[in-house]
Image: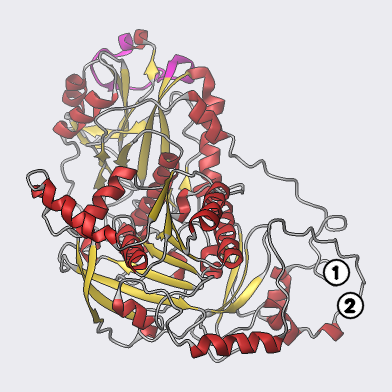
């Protein structure tokens, strides 16, 4: 146990935070629990009311130890100042700030806390997991048009503060927002605290030490600190708050076992949990998207016993099963047949509900022989019918390029070059005579224009203004022999994006469509997972129906940054596993320097994770990335320790 106690307050940090988050002259309470002042071992609760941050800092500096120091961020009645004016006093019988003492909400408080036993500090791993959830929350609300928040590390978790302006009576709205966040983002590892909705809630004061339990090397005491403070604290409107609160999904009553229980195709009530316990008792259930997942070690269906085989059922979703290795094709029906052949199951002859036809699609009819002849015809063409990517070693890795009708995923972390990869592909394809449409949900027209100049012109950006004629000349030469690259900004929804792509195919002979990026398109569904799944399904159908290549840029979550090796996995794709299922080709990009500043700044890594219709000839390779030109150059094979399987560790 570490017995030394570090400095418990950073006066400069406290002052800067309070000055920026409180209104001028605003009365606020400071509360310190179970604390001892210098020269005394006696601990008790303390409070004080302040209208001057400097006075609060002076009083806080009198303490020797505390578990934590708090303040009231909402606007309270100024009359409370007289309880203990700009001074700290023992709480004893003096009432603290109550909900009825608050006049207005100035802040929406979001507390993201890693799950751990009570009364102890978090580990670094637990804190990192909460940080991932923090980023997901902020990203979601930013997409909804919310202004930039104040972000603090509480010492053991993360605090996100959005500037709002609501009367204190609106605590039900604040509560619904937190419940919606909890529903969408809480996991077994990290929880959104839904109890911080009340107006008088006290909040960890950045610049003060957080001391839960004893400080140990694994679970140290940490200073709470402010991470992000926007220059302009723009108020999130009531309309935006109510719109997000409306996303809350009311829990449905549990169905009775006799009337509405789920049934399989035999008509019998079916429980996957019971089935797994009966047939695969050694596989332990894990939480997965509100349902369950089982990793099968060993696999009863194939030779892959290292954890690649799985059974999964999301909440209210279908049962899935299989093996992550491309050489395996068994599914849930095969697994059930293995343990319960159809002839051994009870018969009930249920009436199957009629399926509604899928609108907007044409059913194609052929014979197996004709399909085989068509394949031979395509084979005779060699690779001439494949579409080059503009990155030669990538073409080699996937057998020549992309084929018509394929859906391609290019996934990376933010600022890891996925847009640069996509645009380099677009430049190459337009040079090869293929008109392209780009659905840009992330970059504006001007941002795309700048990227085009960087790629096409050798003139350094700092000389564009003085050498603008030379830039225009190179730009003209670059596009003179290329087919058009059409850009549609801000389609908003996947349905509208698909309409625009289909119109461009009919009117402009488009052969390739690119979406930047999948998680920014709105789809149908109750939460982010369902919406992105719908986006993926619609783009998959579009590629197949129109016979065009659809390149979908997608974002990875932060899990990759926590690994010893910066190697992506399928589970890193944000929001959904549907993209993984729908894609014919999946490519991951990693710019190691963005994760570790000691990595070479121009090194870029590609991973070919899936290539449904052709072999993967090179599973991973490294090339040079020139950020000034937004260009991947000089590709060379990567030297990994034990080939592709070294990073293909499915979880």
Q: How far apart are labels 1 and 2 at the CA level? A: 8 Å
Q: Which mark is residue 110?
A: none
Residue at 37 percent of width and 74 percent of height: 388
List x then y, in percent, for residue 592: 24, 66
In the displayed structure, does residue 453 sit left or right of residue 366? Answer: left
Mark on residue 268?
Answer: 1
The verdict on residue 93 being magenta is yes
Q: Is residue 501 above or below residue 368?
A: above
Residue 239 in view: yes
- Seen from the viewer's position, the closer of residues 224 and 579 is 579
Q: Magenta stretch containing residue 98, yes or no? A: yes
* Residue 2, image x, y percentages: 21, 56
Q: Judge the density around disc 1: few (<14), some (14-19), many (≥20) Cα neighbours within 10 Å.
A: some
In this rendered view, identify the residue nearer to me: 380 or 221. 380
Q: Position of residue 83 (x, y in %)?
A: 33, 12
Q: Which residue is mark 2?
A: 346
Describe the element under mark 1 as helix, strand or loop: loop
Q: Is residue 484 above or below residue 648?
A: above
Q: Earlier in the sequence, mark 1 or mark 2?
A: 1
Q: Nearer the viewer, residue 182 or 342?
A: 342
Instruction: Please report the residue visible at 26 percent of the width from the left and 39 percent of the height from the top.
Output: 228
Q: Is residue 256 left or right of residue 272?
A: right
Farthest-out residue, front: 480
Magenta stretch? 81-104
């Amino acid at each position: 146990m570490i017995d030394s106690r570090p400095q418990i307050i950073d006066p400069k940090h406290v002052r800067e935070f309070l000055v920026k988050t409180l209104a001028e002259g605003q009365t606020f309470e400071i509360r310190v629990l179970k604390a001892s002042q210098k020269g005394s071992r006696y601990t008790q609760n303390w409070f004080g009311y302040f209208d001057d941050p400097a006075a609060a800092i002076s009083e806080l500096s009198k303490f020797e130890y505390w578990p934590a120091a708090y303040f009231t961020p909402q606007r309270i009645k100024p009359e409370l100042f007289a309880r203990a004016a700009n001074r700290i006093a023992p709480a004893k019988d003096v009432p603290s700030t109550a909900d009825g003492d608050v006049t207005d909400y100035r802040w929406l408080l979001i507390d993201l806390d890693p799950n751990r036993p009570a009364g102890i500090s978090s580990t670094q791993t637990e804190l990192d997991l909460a940080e991932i959830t923090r980023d997901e929350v902020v990203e979601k609300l930013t997409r909804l048009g919310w202004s930039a928040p104040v972000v603090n590390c509480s010492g053991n978790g993360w605090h996100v503060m959005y500037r709002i302006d609501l009367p204190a009576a609106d605590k039900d709205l604040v509560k619904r927002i937190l419940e919606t966040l909890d529903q969408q983002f809480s996991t077994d590892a990290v929880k959104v605290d839904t109890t911080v909705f009340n107006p008088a809630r006290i909040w960890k004061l950045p610049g003060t030490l957080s001391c839960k339990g004893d400080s140990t090397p694994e679970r140290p005491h940490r200073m709470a600190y402010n991470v992000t403070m926007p220059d302009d604290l723009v108020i999130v409107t009531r309309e935006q708050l109510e719109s997000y609160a409306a996303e809350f999904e009311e829990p449905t009553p549990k169905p009775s076992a006799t009337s509405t229980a789920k049934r399989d195709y035999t008509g019998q009530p079916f429980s996957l949990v019971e089935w797994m316990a009966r047939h695969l008792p050694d596989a332990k259930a894990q939480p997965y998207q509100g349902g369950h997942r089982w990793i099968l070690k060993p696999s009863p269906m194939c030779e892959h016993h290292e954890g690649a085989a799985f059974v999964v059922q999301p909440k209210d979703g279908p049962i899935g099963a299989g093996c992550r290795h491309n050489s395996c094709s068994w599914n849930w029906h095969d697994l059930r047949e293995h343990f319960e052949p159809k002839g051994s199951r009870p018969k009930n002859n249920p009436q199957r509900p009629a399926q509604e036809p899928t609108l907007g699609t044409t059913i194609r009819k052929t014979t197996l022989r004709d399909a085989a002849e068509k394949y031979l015809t395509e084979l005779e063409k060699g690779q001439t019918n494949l579409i080059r990517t503009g990155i030669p070693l990538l073409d080699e890795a996937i057998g020549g390029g992309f084929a018509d009708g394929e859906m391609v995923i290019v996934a990376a972390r933010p600022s890891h070059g996925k847009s640069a990869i996509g645009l380099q592909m677009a430049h190459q394809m337009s040079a090869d005579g293929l008109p392209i449409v780009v659905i840009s949900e992330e970059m504006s027209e001007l941002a795309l224009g700048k990227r085009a100049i960087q790629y096409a012109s050798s003139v350094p950006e700092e000389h564009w203004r003085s050498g603008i004629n030379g830039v225009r000349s190179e730009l003209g030469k670059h596009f003179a022999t290329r087919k058009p690259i059409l850009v549609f900004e801000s389609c908003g929804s996947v349905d509208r994006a698909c309409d625009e792509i289909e119109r461009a195919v009919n009117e402009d002979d488009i052969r390739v469509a690119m979406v930047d990026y999948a998680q920014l398109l709105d789809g149908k569904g109750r939460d982010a997972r369902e919406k992105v799944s719908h986006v993926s399904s619609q783009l998959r159908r579009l590629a197949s129906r129109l016979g065009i290549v659809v390149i979908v840029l997608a974002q990875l979550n932060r899990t990759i940054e926590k690994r010893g090796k910066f190697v992506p996995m399928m589970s890193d794709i944000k929001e959904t596993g549907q993209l993984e299922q729908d894609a014919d080709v999946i490519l991951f990009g990693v710019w190691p320097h963005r994760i570790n500043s000691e990595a070479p700044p121009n090194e870029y890594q590609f991973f070919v994770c899936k290539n449904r219709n052709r072999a993967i000839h090179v599973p991973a390779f490294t090339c040079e990335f020139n950020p000034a030109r937004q260009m991947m150059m000089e590709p060379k094979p990567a030297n990994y320790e034990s080939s592709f399987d070294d990073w293909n560790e499915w979880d």
